[in-house]
Structure formats: C-alpha cells, structure tokens
Amino acid sequence: MTAEIFPKVKTIDLRKKHIGPSCKVFFSHDPIKIVRAKGQYMYDENGVRYLDCINNVAHVGHSHPMVVKAGAEQMELLNTNSRFLHDNLVQYAQRLQATLPEKLSVCYFVNSGSEANDLALRLAWEYTGHKDVITLDNAYHGHVSSLINISPYKFHQLANAEQSKSVHVALSPDLYRGNYRQDHPDPATAYADDVNNLIQKAHEKGHKVAAFIAESLQSCGGQVIPPAGYFQKVAQHVHRAGGLFIADEVQVGFGRVGTHFWAFQLQGEDFVPDIVTMGKPIGNGHPMSCVVTTREVAEAFKNSGMEYFNTFGGNPVSCAIGLAVLDVIEKEDLQGNALRVGGYLTRLLEQQKEKHPLVGDIRGRGLFVGAELVRDRVKLTPATAEAQDIIYKLKEQHILLSADGPHRNVLKFKPPMCFSEEDADMVVEKIDQILTGTLNAPLSLSFTMRIFLHFFTDIEKALGLQMPSTVHTKNGTPSPQSLWHSHI
C-alpha cells in the first residue's frame, strides 16, 4: 500500500508540529519535497527533476536496482542479529578487508558514522589506557556526546560551552586559508609539529593522548586536502606518545577520491592508520557503518571483560546491501568514473577561477571537490552571503548544491558516483551564468523576488570585483598570477 502524499504545505506544518525544531531542512526559506530519486537525480512531488550534487550517501546512485534487489531478497529470507551464524557477515567482512592494508583485519559492524567513531574512541581508550583525544579545528565526527566533544564544527556553535580538558584542537592542515599555506617550504611538517606541541602540553599537565582523529579529507571543515606526508608525521608523534591514529572515512571512502579506494591512501603506501571508520556510502542510504582495526587493538578491547554487541550491526540484510554496493562500484567502474569526471569537473571549475574573481580556490580529489568563494584574494575575505545566493539560484535551476566550511563559503561537490561529464557541464555553466549575471530569474518566483534578483543577479559587479594582473603571496611579494581586489 502506497502512503498518502500530503500537499507540501501540510508536510511543512506537520514537520513543525512533530519534528524537533533543531532538525533543519535544506533551503529552509523554500524547502523541496522529494518523493523519489534515481541515479544522480531527485524528483519533487510535481515530478520536477533536480540534479543532486549533495548526496555522498547515495554513493552508487539513488535507488540502484542491484542494491534494492539485494536488500529486498535478503529481507524476504531472514533478518536477525549477529549472535547467530550467517555467511553474509563473514563474506562482507572478507570483501571489505580486501580493500584495506593487511594489518587492518578486524571489523565491528554498527549502524551510523557516529556509532563508528564513538566505538573507535572506545577502542583507543581501552588499548592505550589513556583518555585525551586530539582533533582538528573545524572537524565534525558525529552527533553523540562523545563526538560533539571532539567536533569543533559543532561545539564552537554552543554559547558558553567549555571545551573538554581531555580534548585538544590542532590546526586544520588547510593550505589555502590556514597558518601554513602553499608558499610554505614544508607545510606537512609545520602542521604535524603543531600536533606534537599539543601532545607535549598535555604531558606537562599530566594528561596522556589516546588518539588523534581526523577525516582523511576534511568535509564539513571546507573540503580541506592535507599536504602529502602530514599523516605520516602526525602518526609518528602520536605513536611515540602511546596513542593511536583514527582515520575517519565516513564522508570520503569507497573510491570517491578516484585514485584510491580510501582517502587515507592518498598520503602514500607507508601510511596505515590504526583504526578506520566508515559509514554513509557503505550502504547507499541503508543505515550501516563499520570500524576496522588491527588484531592487537581488537584483542585489547576483548580483554577489557566487557562483551560488545550491537543489535542491528552486521545483520544479514545490511551485509547483503553492503556486498551489493561493492559489486556495483566494481561492475560500473565507479572509482574510475570518480577519477575521470572529478578531474573534468575540477578543470571546469579552475576555468571559472581564472574568469571570476569571486572564485578564490579550487581543491579536491575525484568527486570530492570544493570551490572557496572570497571577496578578496589577498585578505581571503569569505564570500558567505554570495555562496548562499549561488546555492539558492542553482536550486531555482533544479540543481542541488551546498556550502560548508567554517565560514560557509565553500561550495561542496560530493554527488553520487554515477555523476557524468554532462552533469558537470550543466552545473558549472549555471554557476558561470550566475557569476556573470546572464541567468534570468525564473518565472516561478514571486514578483518581489524577481525584482530583488534583478538588482543582485551580477554578484561580482555588485561587489565591485575585478581581475588585475598581479597578486601578492602571504608574505606580500608580487606574483605574476591573475588576482583581484575588492573595492568595497
């Protein structure tokens, strides 16, 4: 039986009545009601199609038939907990481990990225006997209490909140906006030394570090790509202090970066984390996640004397879906597609950077790409309002994109992995039209909104931005590159 589809206004009213007010929706001024999706496209209640550039959860494409079939067929047979023997659990663990370095051999299956990261902390605490955690500035690792404490992206939003004394925040290894940038001779060492300094300060206070945790590529932090060698150097400092390295792959794993299956592998074959967490894309929208660690860490966790059991983690249906996702990634060469289309998208965006002064930086790997918007390429003044304006105008053109980072000025591209070059052409063309002022306000908008957009369509002209012939690096010396200054 198909559930009744309410009019949009009724859905909004019922959501306000029954859903917690802190649970936000995209495009809150005019939210979209999505009723179905296929591949990289989503459809509203009127059948209008939207290009999805947001959903890294629908990793192999929305409603992929192989994934849907695997889940439905297993659900018809059996779904129970992992205290009963079932081949799906061990087959999936075996397949998953085959994508990882050999020493990462023990799996714990859970139900969300938050559960995975919370369990990773428990493993580190038990193995090391230490309590302190080092996290990166602007990081987000999940919504449970243990993870809010190590997520500056969240706890900085809390009024009068005190940072836990056992949590230490390291500099985000941001080569564009951070303390050490592309003109620094060795940013990897400089950022890693910051972590080491935190370790030494913790020791001076009688604290000991259990773990360093980082997304392999920072997502909510603004699509930050750490410099090569950074993780290796951090791991050396952390291991010397008796701690473990946790790589959070919840947002960026499963081939999204194109060249590798896991984003931590971008650092080189000589880097292997002690614990890897994964979620979101692992089930293509089905709630599942996993923690993978070494035999030594797993044995220490067992020796604590407390049994670990998760009611739904590793159930037969979840594992069938997980296996199907791996099959689709391989069968449809989605990792290769991420490399090809991601590279194409990045080149298109680089062309926009050369053309439009508002585009300050393009960075990313595969189909994980960020475009940082700034009002001044010397001062790096965040173009936060402009980023939001672009997102809303794209929405009116039936393209879904989001902005993130500490200043909410980084356009985030993390679409389903079936995203095509034609899709990339379309979204970048619309961004170009918005920035040059050639995109007309859609007729569906109210008269008042159309008048507003008429005056504010050409963002860069409104801001008084232009492209001069020289730029200045962080130390103030001229550089023969195209850069611009704001005249506001």
Image (cartoon, grey):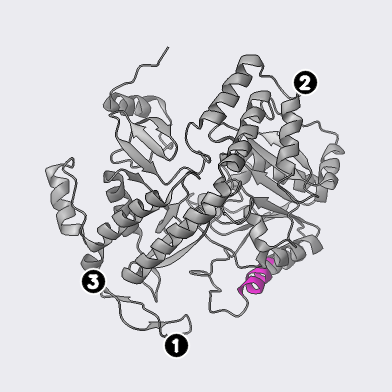
Residue 456 has which mark?
none
Q: From mark 2 to mark 3, how far is it between C-alphas?
A: 67 Å
Q: Position of residue 485 (x, y in %)?
A: 31, 76
Name the quadrant of the C terminus: bottom left
Q: From mark 3 to mark 1, how far is it between C-alphas?
A: 24 Å
Q: Amino acid at mark 1?
A: Thr
Residue at figure coordinates x 31%, y 26% from the top left: 13
Which sits earlier in the primary sequence, circle 1 or circle 2? 2
Q: Which residue is mark 2?
A: 84
Q: Amino acid at mark 2?
A: Phe
Task: Kindly give the residue lying farthest to the bottom in the view shown.
Answer: 477
Q: Which residue is mark 1?
A: 477
Q: Nearer the viewer, mark 1 or mark 2?
A: 2
Q: Amino acid at mark 3?
A: Gly
Q: Which residues are magenta?
A: 187-195
8, above or below 22, in the image? above
Q: Would residue 220 be visible to someone looking at this image?
A: yes
Q: Position of residue 350 (x, y in %)?
A: 41, 66
Instruction: Judge from the rendering whether residue 177 lies leftward or rightward of residue 30; answer left or right.
Output: right
195, above or below 253, in the image? below
Q: Which residue is mark 3?
A: 464
Q: Nearer the viewer, mark 2 or mark 3?
A: 2
Which residue is at the front of the view, 381 or 398?
Answer: 398
Residue at figure coordinates x 77%, y 57% from the top left: 208
Q: For the residue carrying disc 3, how many other residues have a C-alpha within 10 Å: few (<14), some (14-19), or many (20+)?
A: few
The answer to the question of whether label 2 and label 3 lie on touching residues, with beta carbons closer than 8 A, is no
Which type of secondary structure does the marked residue at label 3 adopt? loop
Instruction: Judge from the rendering whether residue 341 lies leftward or rightward of residue 286; answer left or right.
Output: left
Q: Position of residue 174 (x, y in %)?
A: 54, 66
Which type of secondary structure does the marked residue at label 2 adopt? loop
Q: From mark 1 to mark 2, how far is it between C-alphas?
A: 67 Å
